[in-house]
Image (cartoon, helix red, strand yellow):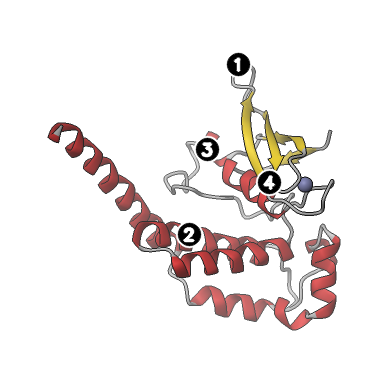
Amino acid sequence: MQTLHAHSQEEAHLYLTVTPCANCSDGPWEITEELDNSETDHTDGMLLARCAHCRAEKKFRFDWTDRAEDRPDDPQHFLPEVINPTPDPSRIIDLGQWLSLFYMMVEKAAVAVNVEARRIGFRAAQCLDEALKFYTDDELPPESAFYVDASRQAFAEHPEKFTRQRLRDMRSKLPDLRVMAARITHDILTENKKKWWQFWKK
Ligand SMILES: [Zn+2]
């Protein structure tokens, strides 16, 4: 079984979102069980998932060596729902897939409200940042930015959609990650306070 190197649970879940089922070429995967080797060393874990379309089951093995949640000394550790705090590009989701995830989330955010819209917006901004990590000195991405044929094909058909300036322009319309994270932290604290208050009202 292939071991997938993820920087966070969030990245692992997004990987399942963009990976089609080998049995029916459809999906998406629904996680049925998370098996973490917490008794050993935390460095790997399994996700058991089922295809929502054909019900095929598959186990995914993840390497958690660089998992953001396990790095309390990291300066960005306080950010909630962080996908990848390192400057390295993802090893499991390619440039084209990050862009697909970004567009998917923009659509979702458009119909969500308040807290939910902010959380999706934060994730969308991170997807664009992940896409930008693949670029070197050129305006166009290197061949190594693509892991799957669907992305290579999308790039061959519409290279203009993959220029770095285009991604930067889209990113500049979204707030800074720290500003978004601070707002989400506030949302989470407010939500917890509300729960506490509701508890006493009973
Ligand atoms: Zn399937």
Does the Cβ of the disc 4 residue fall within 8 Å of ligand 1? yes
Q: Residue at x 34, y 57 (%)?
A: 183
Point out the tag, 1 or 4, that comes first from the N-terminus: 1
Give me the C-alpha separation between circle 3 and circle 4: 28 Å
The residue to which callout 1 is attached is 39
Q: Residue at x 68, y 46 (%)?
A: 52
Residue 191 is situated, as x and y percent measured from the top left of the image, at 28, 46
Q: Residue at x 82, y 37 (%)?
A: 2
* Viewer-side label of 3, 2: 2
Give me the C-alpha separation between circle 2 and circle 4: 22 Å
The residue to which callout 3 is attached is 69
- Where is residue 143, by image quadrant? bottom right
Vertical relation: 140 (above or below) 66: below
Secondary element under disc 1, as helix, strand or loop, is loop
Q: Is residue 194 left or right of residue 172?
A: left
Q: Residue furthest front?
A: 54
The residue to which callout 4 is attached is 52
* Viewer-side label of 2, 4: 4
Give me the C-alpha separation between circle 2 and circle 1: 33 Å
Vertical relation: 39 (above or below) 146: above
How crowded is the residue under tag 4: few (<14 C-alpha within 10 Å), some, or many (20+)?
A: some
Judging depth in this view, the residue of 55 and 70 nearest the camera is 55
Point out the tag, 3 or 1, that comes first from the N-terminus: 1
Vertical relation: 95 (above or below) 6: below
Looking at the rendered structure, the kind of residue marked 4 is Ala
Looking at the rendered structure, the kind of residue marked 2 is Ile
- In which quadrant is the N terminus drawn? top right
Judging depth in this view, the residue of 29 and 105 nearest the camera is 29
Looking at the rendered structure, the kind of residue marked 1 is Glu
Looking at the rendered structure, the kind of residue marked 3 is Glu
Point out the tag, 2 or 1, that comes first from the N-terminus: 1
